[in-house]
Image (cartoon, rainbow, N blue to C red):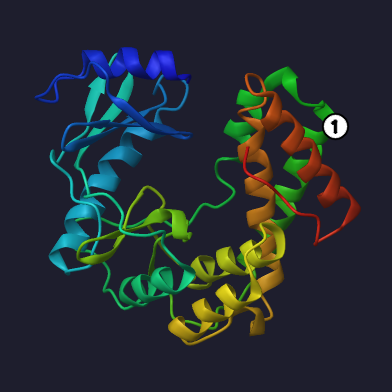
Amino acid sequence: MDEARARDVLAQAEIGGATDGAELLALGENAVFGVGDLVVKVGRGVERAPELLDRARRELAIASYLAEHGVPAVRAVKAEPLLVDGHPVTVWHRIPAALRPAEPRDLAELLKLVHALPAPSGFELPRRELLGGVERWLRLAGDAIDPADAAYLRERRDGFAAAAAALTPHLPLGPIHGDALPRNVHIGPEGPVLVDLETFSADFREHDLVVMALSRDRYGLPAAAYDGFVDAYGWDVREWDGCAVLRGARETASCAWVAQHAPSNPKALAEFGRRVASLRDGDAEVRWYPF
């Protein structure tokens, strides 16, 4: 889904305000627009990915669950998603402008709150299907990527899925954010707030911690910033013998996620090539970049 299509869907949505001149805040799995004091998320079409409508419904239920337990997080305006020309659309209260960039330590403090939560009542959180999107992302990549690379990632997906199923966690199972990165934390006037709740799950808490360990190794997170994250959370997931498995699974998913953007974005195609090559070479220190 490109920006033009997302804006067309936004214009058709009945959100209680004019959408002309809406500010594009992000364009990835969703197109995210700022419309006055609202944030509107436009998802991909459900014709090709029918599960996305249920995911939007669950994200809204999760927002209510976090509000009930006092966890600082984005709050929804509407309790149900809109379905606009085949696209799920959700509407949120806009958070005031960030006072500063979020740091890993801020994320750790929020994860401690999330990891202390009881299971929600009224709905069930899914397992963290970290590798569940790989097939869809590779299909969206189509002929833009080498079929051999797609086959390689499918093989990696299957291998790491089997290895992850055999892991024994160090921490108790329970609610997790599922994509625990500082970019999913907003520092508002009242402190850190969790955003982007689509991947909220019930699974190994280690999933949330491996993300930052991988950020240290692949994305250039300074060692001191990682140490601050560990100090704030109280445990280093690298001490766990299952860390390499969850790391490998996340690397596989991250590589496939980039692939979906390859048909329309030359920078994404180049980054996909970099990532696949590093995985094939077994080089855990090749730097990965946003695009």
Decide which of 103, 265 is in the foreground and name it: 103
Q: Work out which residue is located at the far right of the displayed protein and give it.
A: 281
The percent coordinates of residue 149 (x first, y second) are: 81, 35
What residue sits 18% from the left and 36% below the top? Answer: 38
Q: Is residue 228 toward the left or the right of residue 187 in the image?
A: right
The quadrant of the image that shows the C terminus is top right
User: Which amino acid type corresponds to the residue marked 1 in the rendered image?
Assistant: Ala
What residue sits 60% from the left and 78% below the top? Answer: 224
What residue sits 48% from the left and 82% below the top? Answer: 171
In the rendered image, is residue 174 in sight?
Answer: no
Q: Is residue 43 toward the left or the right of residue 218 in the image?
A: left
Q: Work out which residue is located at the far left of the displayed protein and give it.
A: 16
Q: Work out which residue is located at the far front of the displayed protein and give it.
A: 99
Q: Is residue 60 toward the left or the right of residue 41 in the image?
A: left
The percent coordinates of residue 249 (x first, y second) are: 66, 56
Where 34 sits versus 206, above or below?
above
Find numbered disc 1 in the image and state the secondary structure of the residue it sits on: helix
What residue sits 18% from the left and 50% below the top? Answer: 75
Where 193 sits versus 264, above or below?
below
> Label 1 belongs to which residue?
148
Residue 244 lies in quadrant: bottom right
